Image (cartoon, rainbow, N blue to C red):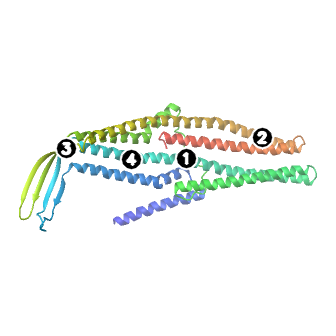
């Protein structure tokens, strides 16, 4: 029965993944689907989760140090005869806090391993949002470049008729043809960029990504309202700081463990000898943990220095987070301001192009004015999409930093 349940579960998960992939290939990938697949299947995430399992096992190993250690001893004497086997138990009664410190350190490192998964997740999300924004920009620009080629083909056809009817000079036809070739070269370059972008996204997702669903836009309604709010939320949710806090706890436990060497440990010994001579022994001993020479003192100095270094690293991380959030916040607000200006500029450029085309037919503008106006209109449309991609990228980055994505 159990294998049947598992097989049905695995089959259902496989069919669900296939359905998402098939839908994405037909209509284009949505951002939510890209994020779900990446965070579920990316090898680095899986590797960090295995590290968590290893850290959990180390906690169990540290806790077992509280239990007695069994032993068995059997040997051969100088005459070739076997000695009677001796079974023993060593139970630590008091170690000066070394076992407790070892358990605390293992638990702290387990927490740090958990936090490392979140660090990797956030890093992966930042990479995904950047790759997604750039691919979305390139896909939209690909359509714009195709429209630009069509516009120049129309202009070439228009001026071709006028040259054929000897209304316009042939140099105008040459200019239109040159501009068309330039537009086609730019289209070829953007096709190459789009192909590279889909390959990068495919590598990140682990699935074939042919295009994005441009009708789908990530929800940006939860963006922070102020820089102070963004910084506070980032500090509160930063997995890097959580990881460093656990590492500091582990370092403090290492200090406690090292200082426990100043104290002897109390150990209960139980021995049972079997064979020709049965014997029972029980004893309690004090065992020094100082080590050779002054090695305990230098060991304490070393672990304390490492802990102080970790404290300074955490302070540096706080400063880096503050700077990083401020840069993303400024990028977002700068892109929003430029976007409005670029949209206005594009509308004006489009109106100017249409006006120049009519005035050219009326003989009030030159063909060069029309061609330059077409180029300005196209460049302004690219500027709009560039700025929109910058706004989207910085907005998504803010959502990742503040833990809302």
Q: Residues at badges 3 and 1 in contact (C-beta under 8 Å)?
A: no
- Residue under pointer 1: 129
Q: Where residue 367 sits: x, y (%)?
A: 86, 45
Question: What residue is rendered at 67% in x and 49% in y?
Answer: 141
| Label of residue 288 in the image | 3
Give the distance between the C-alpha atoms of the residues marked 2 and 1, in whole angstroms: 35 Å
Viewed as shown, does residue 202 lie left or right of 4? right
At a point 54% along the width and 34% down the height, the residue shown is 326
Characterize the local packing of mark 3: few (<14), some (14-19) or many (20 or more) Cα atoms within 10 angstroms: few
Q: Nearer the viewer, mark 2 or mark 4?
A: 4
Count neighbours of disc 4 (C-alpha within 10 A) and say few if under 14, some if 14 to 19, many if 20 or more: many
The residues bearing labels 2 and 4 have C-alpha atoms spaced at a distance of 57 Å
- Of circles 3 and 4, the one toward us is 3
Q: Which label lies toward us, 3 or 1?
A: 3
Question: Which label belongs to residue 114?
Answer: 4
Mark 1 or mark 3, which is nearer the start of the sequence?
1
């Amino acid at each position: 029965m159990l294998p049947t349940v598992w097989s049905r579960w695995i089959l259902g998960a496989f069919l669900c993944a296939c359905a998402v992939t098939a839908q994405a290939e037909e209509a284009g990938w949505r951002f939510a689907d890209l994020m779900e697949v990446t965070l579920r299947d990316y090898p680095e995430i899986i590797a960090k989760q295995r590290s968590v399992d290893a850290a959990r096992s180390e906690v169990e190993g540290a806790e077992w140090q509280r239990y007695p250690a069994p032993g068995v001893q059997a040997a051969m004497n100088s005459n070739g005869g076997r000695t009677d086997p001796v079974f023993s138990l060593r139970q630590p009664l008091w170690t000066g806090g070394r076992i407790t410190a070892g358990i605390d350190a293992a638990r702290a490192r387990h927490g740090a391993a958990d936090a490392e998964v979140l660090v990797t997740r956030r890093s992966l999300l930042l990479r995904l949002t950047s790759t997604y924004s750039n691919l979305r920009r390139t896909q939209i620009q690909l359509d714009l470049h195709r429209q630009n080629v069509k516009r120049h083909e129309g202009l070439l056809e228009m001026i071709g008729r006028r040259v054929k009817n000897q209304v316009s000079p042939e140099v105008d036809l040459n200019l239109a043809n040159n501009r068309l070739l330039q537009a086609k070269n730019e289209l070829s370059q953007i096709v190459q960029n789009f192909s590279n972008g889909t390959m990068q996204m495919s590598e990140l997702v682990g699935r074939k990504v042919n295009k994005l669903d441009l009708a789908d836009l990530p929800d940006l309604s939860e963006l922070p309202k102020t820089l102070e709010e963004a910084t506070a939320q980032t500090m509160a949710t930063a997995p890097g700081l959580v990881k460093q806090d656990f590492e500091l706890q582990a370092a403090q436990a290492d200090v406690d463990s090292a200082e426990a060497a100043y104290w002897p440990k109390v150990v209960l010994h139980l021995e049972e000898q079997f064979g020709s001579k049965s014997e029972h022994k029980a004893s309690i001993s004090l065992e020094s943990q100082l080590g050779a020479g002054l090695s305990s003192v230098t060991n304490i100095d070393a672990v304390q220095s490492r802990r102080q270094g970790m404290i300074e690293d955490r302070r540096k991380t706080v400063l880096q987070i503050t700077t990083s959030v401020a840069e993303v916040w400024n990028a977002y607000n700068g892109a929003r301001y430029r976007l409005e200006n670029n949209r206005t500029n594009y509308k004006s450029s489009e109106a100017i192009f249409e006006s120049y085309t009519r005035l050219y037919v009326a003989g009030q503008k030159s063909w060069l004015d029309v061609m330059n106006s077409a180029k300005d209109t196209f460049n302004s449309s690219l500027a709009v999409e560039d700025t929109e991609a910058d706004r989207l990228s910085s907005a998504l980055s803010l959502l990742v930093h503040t833990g809302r994505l």
